[in-house]
Structures are given as structure tokens and as C-alpha cells.
């Protein structure tokens, strides 16, 4: 078991969330895209927003896909604005 797995289990237990309900890889992938394509501090804030949306019944896989797409397009928009396109 990795340090991350142990942390997710401990933090999940503290918060009453089963580690099986935590899509760790999807969260890390989204955080990476937001940090690299939008702004670094946006990664944890986005993870929180996704958690709120998931708590309201949204599908975590759908959330990850939508936010990843948004983050990737955000980087494209920034390049377009910089070049005047």
C-alpha cells in the first residue's frame, strides 16, 4: 500500500468516506491538467468543486472528463488571447 493509499484510507475514515468511493487517478489527472493549463492553485480548488458536485449527485467520471476538457481548452484560449486570435 502506497503512502497515498494509506492517506486516502485515513482521511476517508476521518470523513466517513470509503476509499473505494474515491477516484484517485481521475482526481490526480484533473489536478494535473488544471495546475499545468490554468493555474496551480486551481487544482485543489477544482478538486473541492468536483467534490461538491459529486455530493450533489453528479457522476465523478463525467465531472473529471468535463473539467479536463475545460482545462485543456483554457490553455488554448490563453494562447489565442496572447496571439490575438
Image: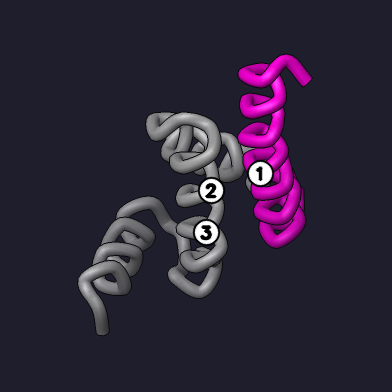
At x 47% / y 65%, what residue is drawn?
24
SS state under label 1: helix
Considering every residue shown, the one lying at the far bottom of the view is 1
Q: Marks 2 and 3: in contact by CB < 8 Å?
A: yes
At x 60% / y 43%, what residue is drawn?
50
**On-image quarter of the N terminus:** bottom left
Q: Marks 1 and 2: in contact by CB < 8 Å?
A: yes
Picture coordinates of residue 62, whole percent (x, y): 76, 56
Picture coordinates of residue 51, whole percent (x, y): 57, 44
The circle drawn on residue 83 is none
Pointer 2 or 1: first along the chain = 2
The magenta stretch spans which residues?
56-85
SS state under label 3: helix
* Figure coloring: one colour
The circle drawn on residue 33 is 2
Picture coordinates of residue 32, whole percent (x, y): 46, 51
Pointer 3 or 1: first along the chain = 3
Classify 22 as above or below 41.
Answer: below
SS state under label 2: helix
Residue of label 3: 29
Amino acid at each position: 500500500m502506497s503512502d497515498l493509499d494509506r492517506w486516502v484510507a485515513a482521511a476517508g475514515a476521518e470523513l466517513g468516506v470509503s476509499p473505494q468511493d474515491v477516484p484517485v487517478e481521475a482526481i490526480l489527472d484533473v489536478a494535473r491538467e488544471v495546475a499545468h493549463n490554468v493555474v496551480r492553485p486551481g487544482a485543489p480548488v477544482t478538486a473541492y468543486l468536483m467534490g461538491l458536485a459529486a455530493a450533489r449527485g453528479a457522476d465523478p467520471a463525467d465531472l473529471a472528463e468535463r473539467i479536463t476538457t475545460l482545462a485543456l481548452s483554457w490553455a488554448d484560449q490563453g494562447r489565442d488571447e496572447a496571439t490575438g486570435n
